[in-house]
Image: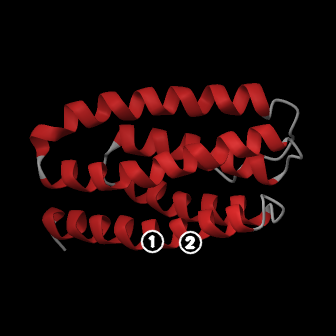
Amino acid sequence: MGSDELLEDFIIEIQDLKAKMSITISKLIECKLQDKSLFEKFGQNVDRIYGTAMTLGHIEIGEYTKAMKDVTYMASASDNEKGQQKTVKAMIKYIELGDEICLALKDPEKVPALNFKLNQEKAKVEILNRREFFSVDKKSCD
């Protein structure tokens, strides 16, 4: 399989998982964040994107995705409702950025601007994780 085919498969995977993750967010909102396993479910889907991004050498996508994976796992193990609410907002942002990621993967000229944005979002997610879930022992599987 050529690199173009791998890239196209990755784009399809992102789009498929985006739909699943949107449903997970809807379920989280419907249950008022009571089913914390949904945070972990979201993180598992994010982990699939993380693995492929790193394998294909898309470091910024991978690093942002890893930060999202980590924060969703931490939210699943926490009783910090404020932190969980902020995590849902970050999850929504992640879904929104999925379209931009797919567009940039198809058009290399868009990659630098995307990477800048992903680095900014990664920093926000890492701060969220440190501030809201500093006492949580659970970590995602690296």
Question: Residue 102 is drawn in which quadrant?
Answer: bottom left
Percent across and percent down for residue 106 are 14, 55
Q: Is residue 21 visible?
A: yes
Percent across and percent down for residue 43 are 62, 58
Q: Residue at x 75, y 25 (%)?
A: 131
Question: Which of these two is toward me, 66 or 124?
Answer: 124
Disc 1 element: helix
Q: Residue at x 80, y 60 (%)?
A: 36
Q: Identify the residue under disc 2.
A: 23
Q: Residue at x 70, y 58 (%)?
A: 39
Q: Which amino acid, by three-letter code, is at mark 2?
A: Ile
In this rendering, the count of numbered labels is: 2
Q: Residues within 10 Å of mark 1 (few under 14, many from 20)?
A: few
- Rendered view: 116 above or below 81: above
Viewport quadrant of the N terminus: bottom left
Q: Residues within 10 Å of mark 2 (few under 14, many from 20)?
A: some
Q: Which amino acid, by three-letter code, is at mark 1?
A: Ala
